[in-house]
Image (tube, grey):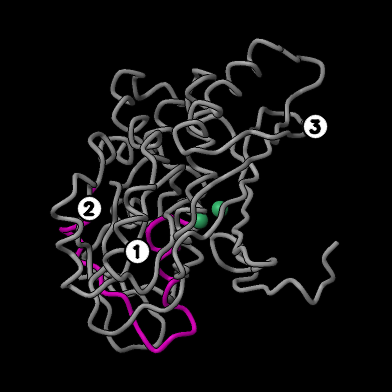
């Protein structure tokens, strides 16, 4: 038994995951649960697992074990559906070197699935959401627009075939990006999920004496996103994020709302957003990990600026 005095909380509420020391081990713990973004249950399970594990990588940790959490309408329980979702999740956990060790399900109106993931910090260093330093560059490791394309798919305006690249990105693990961020001496890191690029970027600089300056032409966006925004296939969350960021982001006057919405689009299993010194960028360029230098960190008051 461990008394409370044996536990040292290293990172508490407000980051991608909690980090605490217990005995000689530093553990990282997180939980996330999502609704289906694709029709195929195996792919949904795999995407949800990749999304949940991502928060461990966003802290610089290594996942070791997970519990499954699922909600579904009790009157419409299809065991084969749940089996496929779990199979997808276990495939991803296998690749990450982690085990599914249990779980819990509950009655819900719509299908939901996610994981609670426990990891260990093998490196001595934790990648926190805060800590970006003036003069550093900002790197993003997946293109944007996943939420908008998923909305287009649900709305029947975007085909499953055209969705494939977005599905591949959602299935792409942030493991390598996390390892490179650590080796490149990153000062801060988070993963881009429900709050969109700018919501998460704002989280990185809020309450700090720095601003993040984004170069709009450098931000990678998936094919079809502009078309889907034009067809009003924008998730409610993007509007919510944009509203929340009003007064916190300095958009150029000539930037249309359509473009602003893309920068606030909620991502499922999005990329890592990393700040590091320019000298560390070589670690990315010599790797096969997708990365775009989307901006830099300047002295400021916790704002996002766009150029
Ligand atoms: Co996160
Ligand atoms: Co999360």
The quadrant of the picture occupied by the C terminus is bottom left
**Residue 167 percent across, percent down from the top left:** 37, 30
Badge number at residue 170: none
Q: In the image shown, does 226 or 108 lie closer to the viewer?
A: 108
Q: Residue at x 39, y 71 (%)?
A: 188
Q: Is residue 29 above or below residue 52?
A: below
Q: In the image shown, does 83 or 235 lie closer to the viewer?
A: 83
For disc 2, the neighbor class at 10 Å (few under 14, some 14 to 19, many from 20) is many
Residue bearing the label numbered 2: 291
Q: Residue at x 62, y 42 (%)?
A: 65
Residue bearing the label numbered 1: 182
The quadrant of the picture occupied by the N terminus is bottom right
Q: Is residue 2 above or below residue 150?
A: below
- Write down the region rendered in magenta: 195-220
**Residue 212 percent across, percent down from the top left:** 31, 75
Find residue 182 and report its image quarter.
bottom left
Q: Secondary structure at mark 2?
A: loop
Q: Is residue 74 above or below residue 96?
A: above
Foreground tag (3 vs 2): 2
């Amino acid at each position: 038994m461990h008394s409370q005095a044996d536990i040292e909380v290293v990172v508490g509420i407000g980051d991608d995951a909690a980090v605490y020391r217990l005995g000689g081990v530093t553990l990282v713990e997180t939980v996330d649960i999502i609704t289906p973004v694709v029709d195929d249950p195996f792919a949904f399970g795999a995407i949800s697992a990749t999304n949940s594990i991502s928060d461990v990588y966003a802290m610089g940790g290594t996942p070791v074990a997970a519990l499954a959490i699922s909600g579904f309408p009790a009157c419409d329980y299809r065991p084969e559906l749940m089996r496929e979702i779990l199979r997808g999740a276990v495939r991803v956990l296998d690749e990450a070197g982690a085990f599914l060790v249990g779980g819990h399900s509950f009655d819900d109106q719509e299908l939901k699935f996610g994981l609670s993931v426990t990891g260990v910090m093998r490196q001595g260093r934790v990648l926190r959401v805060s800590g970006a330093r003036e003069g550093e560059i900002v790197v993003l490791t997946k293109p944007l627009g996943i939420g908008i394309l998923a909305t287009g798919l649900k709305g029947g305006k975007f085909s499953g075939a055209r969705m494939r690249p977005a599905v591949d990105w959602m299935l792409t693990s942030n493991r390598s990006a996390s390892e490179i961020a650590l080796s490149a001496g990153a000062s801060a890191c988070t993963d881009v999920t429900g709050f969109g690029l700018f919501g998460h970027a704002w989280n990185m600089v809020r309450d700090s004496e720095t601003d993040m300056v984004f170069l709009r032409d450098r931000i990678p966006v998936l094919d079809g996103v502009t078309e889907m925004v034009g067809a009003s296939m924008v998730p409610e969350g993007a509007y919510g994020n944009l509203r929340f960021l009003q007064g916190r982001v300095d958009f150029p006057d000539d930037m249309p709302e359509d473009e602003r919405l893309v920068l606030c689009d909620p991502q499922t299993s999005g990329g890592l957003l990393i700040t590091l010194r320019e000298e560390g960028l070589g670690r990315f360029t010599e790797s096969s990990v997708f990365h775009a230098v989307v901006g830099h960190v300047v002295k400021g008051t916790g704002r996002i600026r766009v150029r």
